[in-house]
Amino acid sequence: MKQAAAVVLDTLEQTVYRMEKALTRGNWAQYETADREFHEVFMRESGNSFLPQAYDLTASSITALRVRLQGGEGDYRARSFGEHKLILAELKAGHLDEAARILEDHIMVINESGLVLPPRDTPRAKARTRSIEEYKAIFGR
């Protein structure tokens, strides 16, 4: 188990390093990739085979929320990065309860973001279809 924990910590450390490099360079696509990978480590290493599957089902929506938050007002990206560093530090120190508390706050920031989500019964974009005439107008044919 200690070896598995060391691999997880090393992987988290690598993602935090990549986030830091991306922030320094202003490369938001690289930051978003490393941010996603940071969270995926917890899913993959949870020991629950259903959790990664459930995450995969919602990953595109979660990514869209992250992009929206990171492109919005405030300094979400810097705050998010700071929380990633804190989570990693607490895990390295063996303070699992504190790391879990910070991670929960980090994930639940969506509740204080002011984002308005569509009602539950709103059809997803993929479910909406356009008529042939609308597509012709869009593509100029």
Image (cartoon, grey):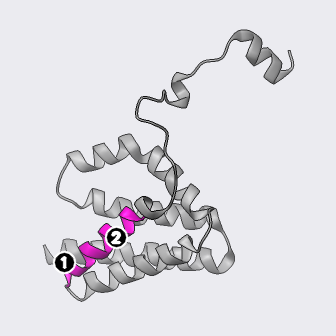
Circle 1 crowding by C-alpha within 10 Å: few under 14, some 14–19, many from 20 = few
The local secondary structure at tag 2 comes to helix
In reply to whether residue 104 is colored magenta, the answer given is: yes
Residue 2 or 100: which is nearer the viewer? Answer: 100
Question: Which numbered tag is attached to residue 64?
Answer: none
Quadrant the C terminus occupies: top right
x%, y% of residue 128?
A: 56, 22
Residue at image x 34%, y 77%?
10
Bounds of the magenta span?
A: 95-109
Residue 124 or 57: which is nearer the viewer? Answer: 124
Residue beneath label 2, please?
105
| Residue contact between numbered discs 1 and 2, judged by CB atoms under 8 Å | no
Residue 44 or 85: which is nearer the viewer? Answer: 85
Q: Residue furthest right?
A: 140
In reply to whether residue 12 is colored magenta, the answer given is: no
Residue at image x 26%, y 81%?
91
Q: Residue furthest top?
A: 132
Question: Which numbered tag is attached to residue 97?
Answer: 1
